[in-house]
Image (tube, rainbow, N blue to C red):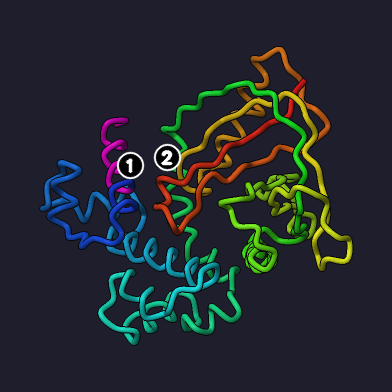
Amino acid sequence: MAKYRDRFVQVLHYIEENLDSELDIDKLCQYSNLSKYHFHRQCSAFFGIPVIAVIRRLRLKRAAYQLTYRDKKVVDIALESGYDSHEAFTRAFKKLFGKSPSEFRRAPDWEVWHKRYEPITALRSHLMGNTAKYEVTIVEFPETQLAAMEHRGPAHHLGTTIKQFIQWRKAQGLSPRNSRTFNLVYDDPVTTPPDQYRFDVCCTVQYPIDASERNIVNKVIPAGKCAVIRHLGSDDTIGAAVQHLYFHWLDHSTFAVRDFPIFFERINFFPEVPESKIITDIFLPIE
């Protein structure tokens, strides 16, 4: 059964890494070594939705990120998403998310987006969370000055905060090339009431930011020992890595947690890289 499941993990990885290619069923069957006579039924049974729907939703997820966080033209995003025309892309996008690409760019509706994307989130959690293997290392993390935008409220509204932070960051010339990107993660979105959820979007700065800066606060990651996992892949499965640190690794270690929240460093970014190639370092402060 594990080998059978691994085939579908490979299919999902292959799709993620080849969204810009023509993904026909013959190629997917050949890659996964599954009979094309049964491929559709097997994928639908295992994924919960048809494989073509998986491909379409992954492409439109990337498109939604490009519309919200990047400055690409809609027509270029349409072509990258596998559509022959702006009109065809607009119809497909609006059918899934309830807004045209231009409307979504102006005012993203992340609540609807999360509902439409839920089958993929559940798929990743089922397939990839069950196969993940984690290597934990111990590091001495230096004191690090941050400029932070605090997100307070439902996790599915986090995209709005991220967009505002990116706009502020661009205006300050704090590109990810010269300023590292961090998240301070105070709460588990699964167990925390939506109105109490807290999450900070941050970047490193050399000096504290002027207190008059709108919605930006100065914060510091204190120097100290941390347990680290390098997470590869979508944020859909990052919760499993966090759970491993807290409830498996920590329980079998001689360490205790310090009085500072777990935090992430974003090494690279989707949609510039496929979701399967996203790198996020997860730091658990310990003593």
Q: Residue furthest right?
A: 211
Could you tell me how far apart the alpha carbons at marks 2 and 1 are, in whole angstroms? 7 Å
Q: Residue at x 64, y 42 (%)?
A: 264
Please name whichever residue, 132 or 192, is drawn nearer the observer in this view of the structure: 132
* Chain part drawn in magenta: 1-12
Using residue 101 as the reference point, say whether residue 200 is left or right of it.
right
Using residue 231 as the reference point, say whether residue 139 is left or right of it.
right
Please name whichever residue, 206 or 138, is drawn nearer the observer in this view of the structure: 206
Quadrant into which the N terminus falls: top left
Neighbour class for label 2 at 10 Å: few (<14), some, many (≥20)? many
Q: Which residue is mark 2?
A: 128
Q: Residue at x 54, y 41 (%)?
A: 280
Neighbour class for label 1 at 10 Å: few (<14), some, many (≥20)? many
In this rendering, the answer to whether 186 lies above or below 64 is above
- The label shown at residue 124 is none
The secondary element bearing badge 2 is classed as loop
Q: Residue at x 28, y 48 (%)?
A: 14
Quadrant into which the C terminus falls: top right
Q: Which amino acid is tagged 2?
A: Met
Q: Which residue is mark 1?
A: 9
Do callouts 2 and 1 mark residues in contact (Cβ within 8 Å)? Answer: yes
Q: Which amino acid is tagged 1?
A: Val
Residue 135 is inside the magenta segment = no
Q: Quadrant of residue 224 in the image?
A: top right
In this rendering, the answer to whether 141 lies above or below 205 is above
The secondary element bearing badge 1 is classed as helix
Q: Earlier in the sequence, mark 2 or mark 1?
A: 1
In percent of width and height, residue 98 lies at 50, 80
In percent of width and height, residue 198 lies at 76, 52
Chief SS of the magenta region: helix
Q: Residue at x 58, y 22 (%)?
A: 137
